[in-house]
Amino acid sequence: MEPALQRRVQRYGWDKAASWYEACWQEQLKPSQDLLLEMAAIQPGERVLDIACGTGLVSFRVREMTGDHGFVLGTDISEKMVDLAAGIVKKKNIPAISFSRMDAELLEVPDASYDAALCALGLMYVPDPQQAMREMYRSLKPGGRAVAAVWGKRDHCGWADIFDIVDQRVKSEVCPMFFHLGNPGMLPLLFEKTGFTAVNTKTISSLLLYQSGEEACMAAFAGGPVALAYHKFSEQVKNEAQAAYLDSIEKYRSGQGYAVPGEFVVAVGYK
């Protein structure tokens, strides 16, 4: 997929997914976010950049850590994601945190202006992850750290067939390199090639729990990376895709629901 098209698919796809995202993924992604924040070791008063922030699930937790004397900037390519997060800031009148629509490959922030740069499950969607890492590196003060989480190996993620199921029904691949950075050694290599030192990586396994087939399908199709393609499907094709997906995760059925395995890889590196 051409980079410009991939960015467009991600921007408008996540616009479609925005209203479903937290309900579908908040609990399922929490283990990866917990590990990312543990490895980030955010301190009071620090300035933190949260790239591909979505609705701010990580950003608001970081804001609690940095306190009133710190600052958090959340960025995302999806305007609707950013609007939802900014709406929370306005409604609750939370100081020292802001959200802005930005491309991860071209951050509109000054050089050496942040103590930490985070990216929780966003690098898989970027056309050029190396450029996104360069931007994280540029934004950091000397001694600052970057922390990124990605999904793990494809065969360790039980929901992975969703991409093939959708790709069979559209003209181009939805996320052609989605699992690449989750392969052994790839994420730390990306950090090291960018110039980060003292790189450390941890891998964890988790279960994505859904109470019903409907809930599993909403997460996979409406609230995730294939949302743009899914919303363009006819009702018949939607039903066919949902049936194919449920068949692919049938082996993970638990009562009326599903316990789908997942894997996350998290890396930290220092400037």
Image: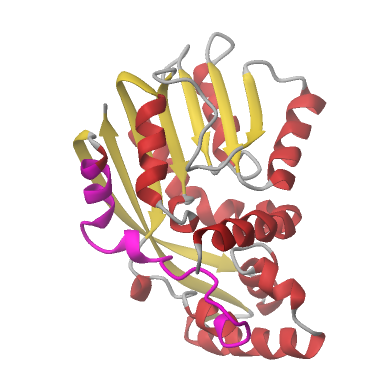
Please determine whether, in this image, residue 92 is positioned above or below residue 247.
above
Please determine whether, in this image, residue 65 is positioned above or below residue 238.
above
In terms of depth relative to the viewer, which is nearer, 130 or 40? Answer: 130
Where is residue 171 shown, x and y percent of the image? 60, 82
Q: Is residue 214 visible?
A: yes
Kindly indicate the quadrant of the structure image that contains residue 244: bottom right
Where is residue 234 shown, x and y percent of the image? 79, 84
Quick check: 143 left or right of 86? Answer: left
Q: Residue at x 44, y 57 (%)?
A: 124
Please determine whether, in this image, residue 181 is positioned above or below residue 59.
below
Quick check: 233 left or right of 254? Answer: right
Quick check: 121 left or right of 209? Answer: left
Q: Residue at x 71, y 44 (%)?
A: 79
Where is residue 103 shown, x and y percent of the image? 56, 42
Kindly indicate the quadrant of the structure image that contains residue 199: top left
Q: Is residue 38 visible?
A: no
Residue segment shown in magenta: 167-193
Please determine whether, in this image, residue 17 is positioned above or below residue 84.
below
Where is residue 29 shown, x and y percent of the image? 51, 53
